[in-house]
Image (cartoon, rainbow, N blue to C red):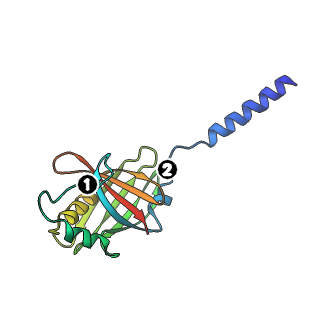
């Protein structure tokens, strides 16, 4: 009886461990919603990065509050353990379109063939476009998405987005 109990316990443990999967469901995270920027921070920061220096950030913040600005939509599918497809986004005046790939296992993310319709002048919009052009990884879930990118000064910045 003791051997049977140990065998059953072993089988249950194996089944439980086999069911544990640390890989993200990339399709669930990225697709089926509009992502809205809330702020851009440093890699480990939790507040808006100061892109303005001694300048005025009020125009950027007013633009950020508009429902149609700083939004991203992803479309795609999964092929060979990598998920990817196309994306379209709006900054303030620019439309941004391109291709994206994300790996649910290591959270790497890349974008390519990024086309920008207008050269933004607003510092927050410039950083948003840069983040979409130079994505290196992602984090988050189906409610919060973080897109990390390498900035001009080689620091890592993070687009902090919420699902609308």
Where residue 94 appears, as percent x and y from the top left, is 23, 73
Q: For mark 1, give the secondary structure.
A: loop
Q: Nearer the viewer, residue 12 or 92?
A: 92
The numbered mark at residue 34 is none
Q: Is residue 3 above or below residue 135?
A: above
Where residue 70 appears, as percent x and y from the top left, is 30, 69
Residue ID at (22%, 63%): 124
Q: Is residue 28 above or below residue 12?
A: below
Question: Reading the chain from its start, which is encountered first: label 2 or label 1?
Answer: 2
Q: Is residue 52 left or right of residue 12?
A: left
Residue ID at (22%, 66%): 125
Pointer 1 residue: 134
Pointer 2 residue: 24
Q: Is residue 81 left or right of residue 108?
A: right
Residue ID at (82%, 23%): 3
Where residue 113 appears, as percent x and y from the top left, is 26, 62
Q: How many numbered tags mark residues here?
A: 2
Residue ID at (26%, 72%): 63
């Amino acid at each position: 009886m003791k051997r049977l109990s140990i065998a059953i316990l072993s089988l249950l443990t194996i089944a439980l461990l086999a069911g544990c999967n640390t890989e993200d469901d990339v399709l669930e995270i990225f697709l089926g919603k509009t992502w809205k920027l809330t702020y851009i921070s440093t890699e480990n920061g939790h507040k808006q990065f100061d892109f303005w220096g001694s300048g005025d950030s009020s125009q950027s913040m007013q633009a950020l509050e508009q429902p149609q600005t700083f939004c991203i939509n992803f479309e795609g599918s999964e092929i060979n353990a990598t998920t990817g497809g196309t994306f379209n986004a709006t900054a303030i005046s620019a439309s941004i379109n391109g291709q994206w790939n994300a790996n649910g296992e290591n959270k790497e993310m890349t974008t390519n063939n990024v086309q920008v319709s207008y050269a933004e002048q607003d510092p927050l919009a410039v950083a948003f476009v840069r983040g979409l052009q130079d994505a290196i990884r992602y984090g988050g879930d189906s409610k919060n998405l973080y897109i990390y990118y390498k900035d001009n000064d080689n620091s890592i910045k993070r687009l902090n987005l919420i699902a609308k």
